[in-house]
Amino acid sequence: MLCTMFDTLAPKLIACVDPVNVTDPCLCINGTYDVQFESLLFHLTHGCHDNYMPTLWSTAVMAGGVFGSVVFGYSADRFGRKLSLLIALSGCIICNLLLTFASVHVGIVFALLSVTGFFGGGYLVISVVLPVELTTTRWRLLLTCLHGWPFGIMTMALTAYLTRRWDYFHLALAVQGLPLVVAMLFVDESPRWLILQKKYNQARRAMIRIAKFNRKPKLDFHFETELSSSTKCQVEKHPPRRYTYMHLIRDKAVFLPLLVLSYSWFSGGIITFGTYFDMSNLAGNIFLKTFITGSLKVGTGLIPLIFSRFVGRKPILIGAIAIACSTAWGSLVLYLVDLADYMPWLAIVGISAIDPMWKVNHVMSVELFPTVIRSMSRAVCNVCSRLASLIAPQIAFLSSIYSPLPFVVYGTLSLLHILIAAIWLPETNNRPLPEELSAENTQSIQSTRL
């Protein structure tokens, strides 16, 4: 999803040999460039492109992510988490291979980036749901804190540094995804989803395999009897209900938390992606800045795990936003007092500090909503994040008008974020995962304590 950070890097023209003393890349036939990374955009345009082209490419990826979130959010609830995750991950690999060998025109690249975003957006929707549903309450936050986004940023920066070329870069990304596809083949489908789809035999087999792998006792007789007799009789009379996105609006217990969490994803997305896409415009080595950002996010991402022993999810989320808000306004102050050289490092602190918010957002998007609509609920949150990522390149582009202007936007959004979360976001710490929507579409939701 963030490959355009390197795909759109524009090398600086140092000197033009033919004609001499020309500073415009479009007029220079033979020149010397300061190339940190031979980007895909530079390969196709040789530096002669509209200033808005990098923003357009980033927008293409995020636009694809919007549609991918919606499609895969529904498919994961309708056809299963594992199958949808395999398709999304395989699609990302294929798109990176196509970018390696088929990038012969700007229009083709634009289309491929859109499709890459489609599969990437779908992957992000499901990648947290399946592992959390396969575990118990004790491990939810740990799994979310170890979610691979920060590690992906570090790996991407290291891959770009080692390859130094767009084609080798995308080929390496595709190869890195292959072991994950193979590993996914050995992962079981979510037993929660299987049970709610009345696929009791598959659910039993999955839980037996999980118990065996973890060296736990086999399922007790009462559970197997319940699955094999009484509930099996009910399925013939009551087939599985099919849910749609309209059910997210109709149920009062779902709709308000979904609105609040959606804004949280939107505001966080603006700040996070805006800083990512503005990274190349900030002083410093792009590889080092990106790698440090990822490594700091790994560390700060563990903060919720540590503090969850003392406080709930909500205070951690608000505290992370408050720090990010402070760094945004602090960047404006640095610019006003002629210390703009320190802005990139304060921006890195801010984007790293906001990572605990993302961990809480992810785990709450699982804990707040019933299993039957969980992936669709996460899809709505991801759509808001993808919409934010569509707007984020435009926000980052504001730095070409007035350097600290993006940080003014980030600070304002953060202040509103704190207010909304403090008033309307419910606490989910130590709550059982809800399973079904209530039949009356009221505030009561049936839960299973696992």
Image (cartoon, rainbow, N blue to C red):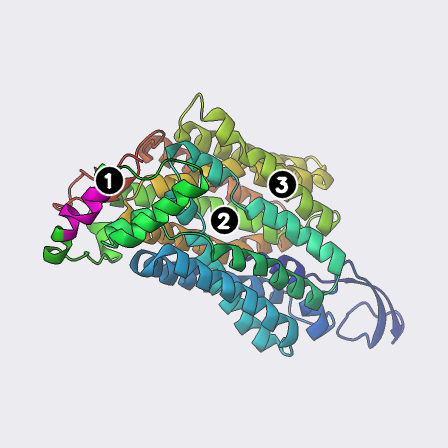
Q: Which residues are magenta?
A: 223-232
Q: Position of residue 218 (x, y in %)?
A: 34, 39
Query: Is residue 112 one of those drawn in magenta?
Result: no
What residue sits 63% from the left and 37% below the top? 296
Is residue 305 something that shows in the picture? yes
In this rendered view, identify the residue nearer to me: 221 or 424.
221
Q: Residues within 10 Å of mark 3 (few under 14, many from 20)?
A: many
Label annotation for residue 347: 3
Q: Earlier in the sequence, mark 2 or mark 1?
A: 1
- Mark 3, secondary structure of its residue: helix
Label annotation for residue 270: 2
Q: Amino acid at mark 2?
A: Ile
Query: Is residue 230 one of those drawn in magenta?
Result: yes
Q: Position of residue 208 (x, y in %)?
A: 36, 45
Q: Amino acid at mark 1?
A: Phe
What residue sits 59% from the left and 38% below the top? 298
Q: Earlier in the sequence, mark 2 or mark 3?
A: 2
Q: Quadrant of residue 102?
A: bottom right
Q: Amino acid at mark 3?
A: Ala
In the rendered structure, the answer to whether residue 182 lies left or right of residue 261 reads right
Label annotation for residue 384: none
Q: Which residue is mark 1?
A: 223
Residue 308 position (above or below residue 71): above
Q: Residues within 10 Å of mark 2 (few under 14, many from 20)?
A: many
Q: Residues within 10 Å of mark 1 (few under 14, many from 20)?
A: few
Total number of numbered discs in the rendering: 3
In this rendered view, identify the residue nearer to me: 160 or 393.
160
In this rendered view, identify the residue nearer to me: 74 or 222.
222
Determine contact: label 2, label 1, CB under 8 Å.
no
- Mark 1, secondary structure of its residue: helix
